[in-house]
Image (cartoon, rainbow, N blue to C red):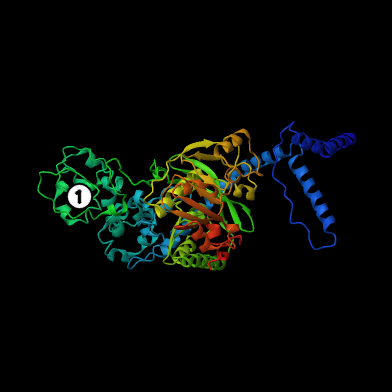
């Protein structure tokens, strides 16, 4: 037996001593391909000591040995990968149970907090089950998924039918004074039936039926024309009813109720200006005074309605019949399923903690059947640090905006999930930083137009941001481009969505995956081929089509590559020679602009970009004069723009004299 042990030890020793270097040599020679776990980089070199050379030499040897026995040891990658999968599988039941218990605890605490804010019934003890949780805005987390923390849309959840707390209120069964309370005196059975839980009147308690927010909501929820035709330009009743007089629902539409003359003239209740195609030949309406429409005269009596006072101000000039919608409408923003944003389950676990972030792994499912896993993070700062950093960054931006009032100044904060209202429902125990984002926007002076990039629901976050990274993906980039156009160039028609190109053989391990060393979760990298015409950029050797061929030929499967950063290099200038917009854009951005540079450039004649780590010393007014800048945009990841988390943002070091 002893000899067997010695033989096994000798084999292992030979594998480590001889096999590993041989594997590295074969991989570098192209004879075999070894999957590497990570890229081993050297630390800061020693300097200022008498033995710098020796110390740096030892550091190099250490780095080489670490790289050798981390990436080239036979079977080590497979061992680590399979161990990670096994660990995830073994922990899944416990993680699921833990997440559900935390969700239940959060719901109970939320119900208790809501109960503390509820005024008690006259003559009865305070109702700690919060019957008024059926009011809009407070029903969402409790009503649809008893086993998880849930987000809901209050407009689609009937609050009256889901008020179980009223049926289980112990104080009602033992508090005689309830019979004298005005809301309860209309339910006599309560006074004579001790088991109130079975008394039907309790389920229809007056406090619920008389809640003002509920009684005033039906008109909105039952008016199909209003809910399906917010812009009015796409109202189906107009296109199918030539006389227009057969569309009574339109008389109750919110935009029309503000025009008194319209309510007294049913035949003309739908403003002609909103008829996109103007395809109904029998329409015999009088000459419309609104500039955008050129309809023929009619034989009906003249209509006395004023020139359309509703939202046409925000619509593009309808100079041609085919133009039926604003050019900046984003198709990807329209939900295809009413259950798209309704969560059926969600639980999260802490995956890693770094100097700057706490990284969480989130398992989530939706009522339309979609389910996924993604990584996200919170900032590792105290409340005082958040407040101080917010104010410092806001001051730096206001300083730039005041330095030159001849240009338009814009800010778009590239939102993290932590800046949303739903963050605390997804990652329990963490607080949303939305109040700090709101503070930042409130600190912008009158010369600044500022917005938060829109990831209004957790489904938006999943679809517009990489699952394992903090950057927006190709779809999120296009969505941000549309929002930028609405903010800066509302008169510009954005380019259409391009042709998607995927690289399914490769794995994109994002920043969160690298921080948590999560190898069982990655993204499929996608780009879009947009038809934007010829342009020139500072990266003269860069070619979109050449990069597509290169990335299709190579398989990236390790964490030492960032396909996002390698496919889209940094570009400092972009020029579209066929554009004659008279607008030139100066951007102070970060790595989010690498994928967005060409898209943003399509809306201007010239775009000049400075990245966060090369802003120091930039002469602001000279750049504006040199490139004839008309618009300035500051757009960065909120972690940097709001909190300067890594102290690498140099907006305050831009020279304005």
Q: Quadrant of residue 467?
A: top right
- Count up the numbered dots: 1
Asked whether residue 424 appears in the rendered view, the answer is no
- Measuring from the top left, give residue 650's x and y in whole percent: 58, 62
Along the viewing direction, whichever of 232 and 69 lies nearer the viewer: 232
**Residue occupying the point 71% across, 34% down:** 33
Image check: 96 left or right of 26?
left
**Residue occupying the point 30% across, 43% down:** 324
- Measuring from the top left, give residue 638's x and y in whole percent: 52, 57
- Around disc 1, counting alpha carbons within 10 Å, would you say few (fewer than 14), some (14 to 19), or many (20 or more)? some
**Residue occupied by mark 1:** 251
**Residue occupying the point 79% across, 38% down:** 20
- Measuring from the top left, give residue 304's x and y in whole percent: 14, 54
Image check: 578 left or right of 511?
left
Quadrant of the rendering where the N terminus is positioned: top right
Helix, strand or loop for disc 1: helix
Question: Please, which residue is most extreme toward the top here?
Answer: 31
- Measuring from the top left, give residue 70's x and y in whole percent: 75, 43
Along the viewing direction, whichever of 293 and 56 lies nearer the viewer: 293
Along the viewing direction, whichever of 206 and 459 lies nearer the viewer: 459
Q: Quadrant of residue 322?
A: top left
Along the viewing direction, whichever of 411 and 520 lies nearer the viewer: 411
Asked whether residue 61 appears in the rendered view, the answer is yes
Image check: 279 left or right of 145?
left
Question: Please, which residue is most extreme toward the right here?
Answer: 3
């Amino acid at each position: 037996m002893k000899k067997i042990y010695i033989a096994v030890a000798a084999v292992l020793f030979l594998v480590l001593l001889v096999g590993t270097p041989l594997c590295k040599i074969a991989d570098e020679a192209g004879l075999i391909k070894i999957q590497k776990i990570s890229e081993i980089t050297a630390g800061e070199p020693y300097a200022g000591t008498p033995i710098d050379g020796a110390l740096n030499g030892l550091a190099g040897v250490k780095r080489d040995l670490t790289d050798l026995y981390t990436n080239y040891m036979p079977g080590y990658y497979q061992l680590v990968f399979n161990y990670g999968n096994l660990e995830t599988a073994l922990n899944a039941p416990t993680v699921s149970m833990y997440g559900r218990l935390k969700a239940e605890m959060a719901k109970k605490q939320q119900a208790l907090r809501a109960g503390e804010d509820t005024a008690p019934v006259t003559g009865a003890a305070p109702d700690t089950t919060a019957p008024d949780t059926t009011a809009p805005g407070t029903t969402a987390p409790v009503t649809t998924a008893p086993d998880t923390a849930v987000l809901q849309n209050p407009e689609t959840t009937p609050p009256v039918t889901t008020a179980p707390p009223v049926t289980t209120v112990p104080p009602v069964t033992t508090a005689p004074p309830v019979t004298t309370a005005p809301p309860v005196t209309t339910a006599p059975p309560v006074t004579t039936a001790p088991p109130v839980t079975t008394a039907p009147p309790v389920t229809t308690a007056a406090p619920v039926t008389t809640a003002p927010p509920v009684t005033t909501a039906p008109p909105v929820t039952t008016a199909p024309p209003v809910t399906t035709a917010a812009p009015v330009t796409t109202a189906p009743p107009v296109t199918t009813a030539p006389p227009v007089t057969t569309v009574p629902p339109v008389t109750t539409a919110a935009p029309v109720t503000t025009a008194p003359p319209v309510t007294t003239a049913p035949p003309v209740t739908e403003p002609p200006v909103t008829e996109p195609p103007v395809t109904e030949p029998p329409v015999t309406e009088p000459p419309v005074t609104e500039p955008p429409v050129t309809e023929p005269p009619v034989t009906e009596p003249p209509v006395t309605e004023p020139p359309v006072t509703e939202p046409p101000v925000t619509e593009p000039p309808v100079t041609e019949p085919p133009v039926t919608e604003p050019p900046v409408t984003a198709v990807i923003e329209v939900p295809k399923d009413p259950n798209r944003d309704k969560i059926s389950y969600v639980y999260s676990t802490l995956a890693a903690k770094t100097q700057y972030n706490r990284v969480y792994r989130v398992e989530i499912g939706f009522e339309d059947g979609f389910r996924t896993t993604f990584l996200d993070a919170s900032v590792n700062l105290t409340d005082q640090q958040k407040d101080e950093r917010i104010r410092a960054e806001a001051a730096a931006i206001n300083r730039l905006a005041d330095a030159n009032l001849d240009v338009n100044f814009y800010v778009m904060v590239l939102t993290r999930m932590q800046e949303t209202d739903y963050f605390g429902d997804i990652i329990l125990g963490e607080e949303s930083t939305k109040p700090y984002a709101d503070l930042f926007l409130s600190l912008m002076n009158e010369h600044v137009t500022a917005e938060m990039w829109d990831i209004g629901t957790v489904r938006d976050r999943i679809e517009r941001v990489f699952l394992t990274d903090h950057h927006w993906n190709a779809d999120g980039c296009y969505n941000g481009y549309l929002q930028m156009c609405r903010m800066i160039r509302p008169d510009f028609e954005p380019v259409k969505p391009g042709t998607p190109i995927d690289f399914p053989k490769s794995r994109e391990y994002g920043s969160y995956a690298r921080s948590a060393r999560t190898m069982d979760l990655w993204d499929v990298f996608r780009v879009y081929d947009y038809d934007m015409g010829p342009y020139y950029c500072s990266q003269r050797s860069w070619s979109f089509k050449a990069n597509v061929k290169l990335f299709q030929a190579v398989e990236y499967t390790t964490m030492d590559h960032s396909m996002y950063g390698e496919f889209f290099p940094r570009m400092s200038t972009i020029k579209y020679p066929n554009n004659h917009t008279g607008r030139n854009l100066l951007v102070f951005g970060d790595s989010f602009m690498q994928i967005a540079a060409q898209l943003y450039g399509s809306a201007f004649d010239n775009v000049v970009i400075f990245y966060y780590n090369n802003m120091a010393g930039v002469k602001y007014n000279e750049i504006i004069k040199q490139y004839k800048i008309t618009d300035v945009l500051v757009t960065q990841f909120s972690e940097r723009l709001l909190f300067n988390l890594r102290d690498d943002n140099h907006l305050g070091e831009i020279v304005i004299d």
